[in-house]
Image (cartoon, rainbow, N blue to C red):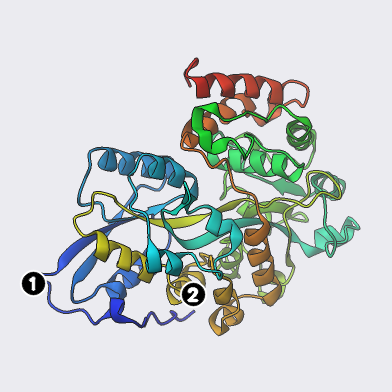
Amino acid sequence: MGAVGLALTGSVLAACGGDGGRAQLNWYINPDGQVTLNKLAETCSTDDYKINIQVLPASATDQRTQLARRLAAKDSSTDLMSLDPVFVPEFANAKWLAPFEGELADQVLDDDVLKGAAETVQWDDKVVAAPQWANTQVLWYRKSLAKAAGLDMTKPVTWDQVIDAADAEGGTVGVQANKYEAYVVWINSLIQGAGGNILDPSTVESGRDAKVTIDSEAGRDAAAVIQKLARSKARQADFTTSNEGTSLGQMFPAKGPGEFMTNWTFVYKNYEGLIGKAGGPKDKKGLEDLGWARYPQTVAGEQSKPPIGGIDIGVGAYSKHLDYAQQAAVCVTSAKAQSALAVNEGLMPSRQSVYDSPELTKAYPASLLELYSQSIETGGPRPKSAFYSQISNAVQSRWHSPTSVSPRTTPERSAAFLKSILRGEALL
């Protein structure tokens, strides 16, 4: 597919000149979408500054560690950084991010930004980062499998229905249940889908004094879903170590009916690029058997809360070129930049207008674009806490292995441990 043009307008995007005298801005990116991000860095450079790409490690945890070490040391060469949304509160609370103010803040966070993405860049009533691309999960499935099971995918479906349908037809259910961040994403969405939260949202920004609410009816409903899949024949063989990539090959197996799978927005482009290849559909007609629906409900009748992810662009508080860095951040998160990332890399926009653009409506099915934008608009964020890393690790330590999860004991045990971690009374 041809690259979307990156010609962007405005004084911020003046043509590049020679390097002599230009400020050098370092932009630390995660490895996703490097080709387009490099083009953005080139196009968004101006006569006044040049944006240089620095690639962070693949793991979100390692990305956080590297950036935190630099910023804790007041590194003046960390100008822009691509941040997983869950790390924004920690960095903002530590005063490591330069807030956007005035007209820049209005540009970064206007009414065009989807609600789920907008919530990730605000801290202490300030706009502390710029949403670049947004991520969410949907339910991917084989239409033929759902039809054989008698499941009406035009209506909301529950986790129980999905597991039972796959079990009855010899299919499987793909999730992310290894001991890592994506497992917490699943747990959090299950709990929110049952009307609860890991932490009370009204207290979460109070840090160590946040109220732990994982031991609740919603927590038990979430544990029941995990337990049911763990005990089902629909469980995939690598269930306890599953990640975003492991179940991709189960959708179009050489034999068998395929799967239902909760996974991120990259899935469509992945399978589109695998037509006729190993792990993908045999032909274009085979790709038409790929279906998508809103994230499953934890409790029947209770709207699901799809996960919210993506990348926000922060500006280092110790940058020597704060004004230029913030101008550059506005440029690399513009509507045209987001369109290029979506079409070329499968990294979906945080702005509604981009979903409606001719570039995206040509590149994706209309129903899929609508599902993505609705899921981001109405999805559920993970706890917005400066102590998120500790919270995530505490939850992982008590909910893994998923084969040991019990509605009777797991929420209670994890609540007690999480309280101890937040109070500094226990170690991870």
**In-image side of 13 versus 410 (left or right):** left
Q: Which of the 4 image quarters holds residue 79?
A: bottom left
Q: Can see residue 86?
A: yes
Q: Residue at x 56, y 64 (%)?
A: 270
Counting from the top left corner in percent of width and height, residue 339 is at 49, 74
* Three-letter code for the amino acid on which mark 1 is drawn: Gly
Q: Residue furthest right?
A: 150
Relative side of 98 to 399, left or right: left
Of the pair 119 and 223, the residue shown nearer to us: 119
Mark 1 element type:
loop
Residue 239 lies, in percent from the top left, at: 65, 38
Q: Which residue is mark 2?
A: 339
Q: Mark 2: few, some, or many residues within 10 Å (few <14, many ≥20)? A: many
Q: Is 75 placed above or below 356 here?
A: above
The secondary structure type at the circle numbered 2 is helix
Residue at image mark 1: 20
Left or right of 48: which side holds 212? Answer: right
Residue 400: image quadrant is top right
Spatial separation of the CA atoms under disc 2 and disc 1: 32 Å
Q: Residue 39, percent across and down?
A: 33, 72
Return the x and y of residue 61 as percentages of the image width and height: 42, 40
The one of 78 and 106 positioned closer to us in this rendering: 106
Q: Residue furthest left?
A: 20
Identify which residue, 132 or 245, lies in the foreground: 132
